[in-house]
Amino acid sequence: MSPFDEGLPAVDNLDAELRSAVQAAAVVAAADGQLMVITSGWRSGRRRYGRSARGPRGP
């Protein structure tokens, strides 16, 4: 997916500063003739830790 694919949780739910940095890098890459895509992104607690997850796991 593109770093500019608005409406997708994997892009929209990234930390705002990280998302901006990734988008800026994609612009620079495009100017250099390279296509930048995101193959992984934000994941909900359920997606990260499984069906029974309630939040991040701690010690």
Image (cartoon, grey):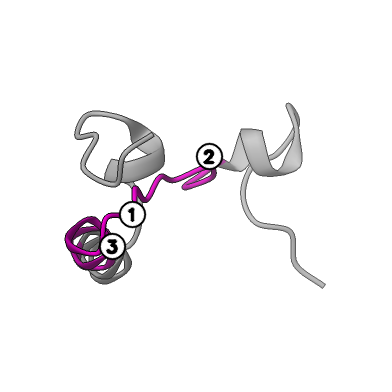
Closer to the N terminus: mark 2 or mark 1? Answer: 1
Query: Residue at the location (70% across, 39% down)?
Result: 53
Where is residue 32 drawn, in percent x and y?
A: 25, 64
Q: Which residues are magenta?
A: 24-44
Q: Secondary structure at mark 3?
A: helix
Q: Gap in Å between the C-alphas at discs 2 and 1?
A: 30 Å
Where is residue 50 drawn, in percent x and y?
A: 75, 33
- Please give the residue where the numbered disc 2 appears in the rendered image: 44
Query: Residue at the location (21% across, 67% down)?
Result: 28
Closer to the N terminus: mark 2 or mark 3? Answer: 3
Q: Secondary structure at mark 1?
A: loop
- Please give the residue where the numbered disc 1 appears in the rendered image: 34
Horizontal side of 57 relative to 4 (left or right) equals right
Give the answer, above or below, for where 12 lies relative to 15.
above
Give the answer, above or below, for where 3 lies relative to 8.
below
40 part of magenta stretch: yes
- In the image shown, does 52 or 23 lie closer to the viewer? 23
Closer to the N terminus: mark 3 or mark 1? Answer: 3
Query: Residue at the location (59% across, 42% down)?
Result: 45
Where is residue 7 drawn, in percent x and y?
A: 22, 29
